[in-house]
Image (cartoon, rainbow, N blue to C red):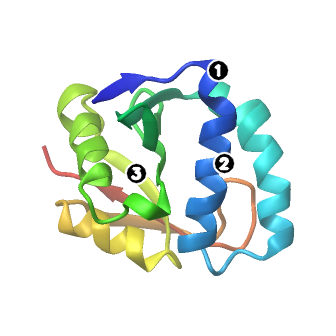
Amino acid sequence: MIVQATQADYLTLIDLWERSVRATHDFLPETEIAQLKPLILNEYFAQVCLHVVVRDNQILGFLGSSEDNIEMLFIDPDFRRTGVGSSLLDFAVKQLGIHKVDVNEQNTQAVNFYKKSGFEVVGRSELDGQGNPYPLLHMVCPQ
């Protein structure tokens, strides 16, 4: 079941985010994770519309979106490859009408996930959203 998250979910989401990042973002040094964590918890969560996948009262993944972009999509590492990510992406495209995402180029698992789901690379930025040297691929899903 996909439902809108509340501020009461933030601590669960930041824990899930950190475990997911550690499982997929091996290019990020520990210092970057430590710097990002409070920003995401205290600022970024409040700036996006958050939806979560809940099964048996447990949050398995979440989607953060803006009006026209998937800003974050993270899955509990224990539930990767179980359809949670695909459910959230399908929800974003079909229910929210979002067809764009920026993905860390070095996160090849995510890049491949989006490509397999029909997204195509339409651009590239040398720096990430914080101005760090982690290139982003700009991807869209043709409508």
Q: Is disc 3 placed on a helix, strand or loop?
A: strand
Is 92 placed left or right of 143 in the picture?
right
Residue at the disc numbered 2? 15
> In the rendered view, would you say 23 is above or below 2?
below
The CA distance from mark 1 to mark 2 is 13 Å
Residues at marks 3 and 2 touching, judged by CB atoms closer than 8 Å: no
Residues at marks 1 and 2 touching, judged by CB atoms closer than 8 Å: no
Residue 82 at x, y percent in the picture: 26, 59
Q: Which residue lies furthest to the front in this view?
A: 56
Crowdedness near tag 3: few (<14), some (14–19) or many (≥20) residues, C-alpha within 10 Å: many
Going from N to C along the chain, the mark reached first, 3 or 2, is 2
Residue 141 at x, y percent in the picture: 22, 52
Can I make out residue 135 in this image?
A: no
Residue drawn at x 24%, y 35% is 91
**Kind of residue indicated by mark 3:** Val
The quadrant the C terminus occupies is: top left
> In the rendered view, would you say 40 is above or below 141?
above
> Which quadrant would residue 4 be assigned to in this image?
top left
Residue at the disc numbered 1? 8
The CA distance from mark 3 to mark 1 is 26 Å
Q: Is disc 2 placed on a helix, strand or loop?
A: helix
Is 21 placed left or right of 69 in the picture?
right
**Kind of residue indicated by mark 2:** Asp
Is 16 placed left or right of 53 in the picture?
right
Residue drawn at x 24%, y 68% is 115
Residue at the disc numbered 3? 101
> Which quadrant would residue 67 be assigned to in this image?
top left
Q: Which mark is residue 127?
A: none
**Kind of residue indicated by mark 1:** Ala
Is 98 placed left or right of 143 in the picture?
right
The CA distance from mark 3 to mark 2 is 22 Å
Residue drawn at x 66%, y 24% is 46
